[in-house]
Amino acid sequence: MPAGFSTLDFYFILPELVLTGGALLLLLLSVTVPKQDGVLLGVTLVTIATTLVAVSAFAGLDETVSRGLLAIDGFAAFFKVLALLSAALTVLMSAPYLRVEGLKAGEYYFLILCATLGMMFMASGLDLITLFIGLETMALSFYVLVGYLKPNPRSNEAAVKYFLLGAFSLGILLYGMSLLYGATGTTSLAGISAALSGQETSAVLVLAVILVGAGMGFKIAAVPFHMWAPDVYEGAPTPVTAFLSVGSKAASFAMLLRIFVEGLPALAEEWKTLFWGLAVVTMTVGNIAALTQSNLKRMLAYSSIAHAGYLLIGVVVGTERGVASMLVYLGVYLFMQLGVFGIVTAMRRGDIIGDELKDLTGLFKRSPVVGFAMLCFMLSLGGIPPTAGFMGKMWLFGAAIDAGEIWLVVIAVLNSAVSAYYYLRVVVFMWINEDEPAGSPIAIGPTMAVALGVALLGTVVLGVYPQALFEYAQSAASTLDGITSSIALR
């Protein structure tokens, strides 16, 4: 065993070990058990549930383990829970999709768990190397998942674009990290923070901030690093798109906060200015581009870009409440975004892809329950009360107002008004042509029903009673080092 490590370090990564063991068991079962789709689904869900229990076992801890490489704190636990919940709902909605597409479940579920494993390390990493390993574990899994529809040219094209642009952005990110290492002599976030404390800001450090910000901007699909998102969202299998838009985004924001809030508080003025501009451009371009989309998955891609712009407001604020508001927003975003993609997945049957706006025509008449769920998800994405999306935006904008970012809030509110058009446009499509033949109702299997039920419940309940999520997010944000001491307001 390497010097400085002990068996206790392995105890603290018990959730990751459970998830890894479950993923390896899936691979074994996929080649040994005949007609194993139901078995593989059960093993995957049990693995995720067991990992969630293991994460909860460390509730209340605030420890640095593995020689400073990992944090076992409330912030990491929050994002681990988000990653596991998004993985579980994705797996549930994937089961019927895999049957329709005739895809093998074993490798698919294995890659879902591997991506989740990377997200968990991204949430708890306290060293640039640890964060990089977690990021690449997640990214490599998604490169394969995006191209999982092998006979589909759009899926192949999306995978190639995602891989090439991902490799390019990774080079930018690593260059920025290497500059930080050269300037401070360490890859530890705590060490970088200590080395930069009281040090005069140099051109090298500013360049490092820009490069690391650009690399992370690609992962969160911030403008102008968003060019991959529409094509990848459209071409990837719909459940993969859902997981990419929620799990990957949440993990990337966790990594972004770790690097900039914990590692670079001394350069707060520089990176807050950078993210202020990114927030404005991202939310504006995302919403304007979404206005003209006829493909539902492309529209949701631009919508996801706009939501990344809203989330960057919390980074700009940089206070404990600002970070807590980001966590709240990510929590509600999980349910409403996965719910929408769950319905898009359910509409895939036979020769009908179900991802065009015209495919929603008369949905209320064909399937009233599904239509009502879609209405709730659209209203929540638009931030219309009394849904969870409204509470998330209210908390986020309130934190920005407290920090004096009035103009940023004004721009965000105007963008929210713009977004209401294309979200309500979806509702209009569900209501029109009611006098025409309704066509066949949407068949909802048991696993899809559970996924949509959980998503709908989260969207409605967190809109009416968000207090529990607020308190959990506040507790998680308070464990992020450097959040209240060294962050200066703009």
Image: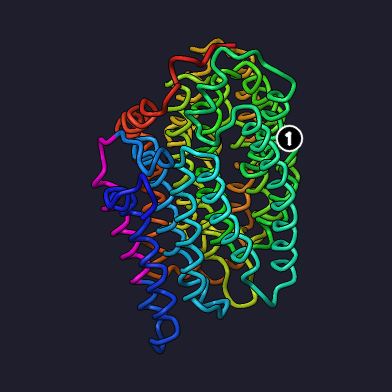
What residue do we see at 44% from left, 68% from top?
Answer: 444
Please state the horizontal and vertical placement of residue 489, each as a whole percent of the image: 55, 11
Please state the horizontal and vertical placement of residue 159, each as a whole percent of the image: 69, 63
Of residues 103 and 423, the one nearer the viewer is 103
Q: Quadrant of the N terminus?
A: bottom left
What residue do we see at 26% from left, 46% from top?
Answer: 56
Question: How many tags in the picture?
Answer: 1
Q: Residues within 10 Å of mark 1 (few under 14, many from 20)?
A: many
Please state the horizontal and vertical placement of residue 34, each as a whole percent of the image: 40, 89
| Residue 54 colored in magenta in the image | yes
Quick check: can you spot residue 434? no
Going by the image, does 354 lie left or right of 365? right
What residue do we see at 55% from left, 78% from top?
Answer: 103
* Residue at which label 1 appears: 285
Going by the image, does 460 lie left or right of 199? left
64, above or below 43, in the image = above
153, above or below 140, in the image = below
Please state the horizontal and vertical placement of residue 396, each as a whole percent of the image: 49, 25
Q: Which residues are drawn in magenta?
A: 42-61
